[in-house]
Amino acid sequence: MPPKARPTGLGLHHDKGSLRQLFLVIASVWTPENHDVVLAVLALVDTTLIASLLLILLFSGYRNFVARPLTCPLARER
């Protein structure tokens, strides 16, 4: 009679079937679903649009508050 395999800490026996099943379960956890990929792409697009909006606001603020006094005729007389 062959000796029985001892259970590991996960409660699995040392045979090819259970190790293969464990590998498939771990691989399925890390595989993204279609909706996860779509949400990640939409989050990236959203972040890009917000960053672009902040750059537009930054440059328009510079143009309105810094560049204008340099071109003002009163600023040249000083």
Image (cartoon, rainbow, N blue to C red):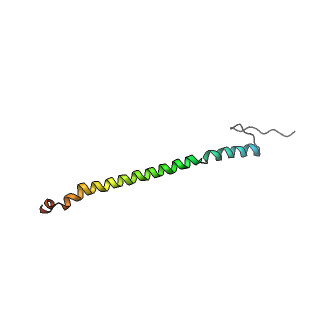
Q: Residue furthest left?
A: 77
The reply, left or right, for residue 59 in relation to residue 12 is: left
Q: Quadrant of residue 25?
A: top right
Q: Residue 16 location in percent, x, y?
A: 76, 46
Q: Residue 70 location in percent, x, y?
A: 20, 60
Residue in the picture at 39% in, 54% down: 52
Q: Quadrant of residue 66?
A: bottom left
Using the image as rendered, state which of residue 49 and residue 62 is in the foreground: 49
Task: State which quarter of the image contains the N terminus.
Answer: top right
Q: Residue 26 location in percent, x, y?
A: 65, 45
Q: Residue furthest right?
A: 1
Q: Residue 53 location in percent, x, y?
A: 37, 52
The reply, left or right, for residue 44 in relation to residue 65 is: right
Residue in the picture at 35% in, 55% down: 55
Residue in the picture at 32% in, 53% down: 57
Using the image as rendered, state which of residue 36 and residue 4 is in the foreground: 36
Count of marks placed on residues: 0
When the figure is inspected, residue 72 is found, relative to residue 44, above or below; the finding is: below
The reply, left or right, for residue 32 in relation to residue 44 is: right
Using the image as rendered, state which of residue 36 and residue 2 is in the foreground: 36
Task: State which quarter of the image contains the C terminus.
Answer: bottom left
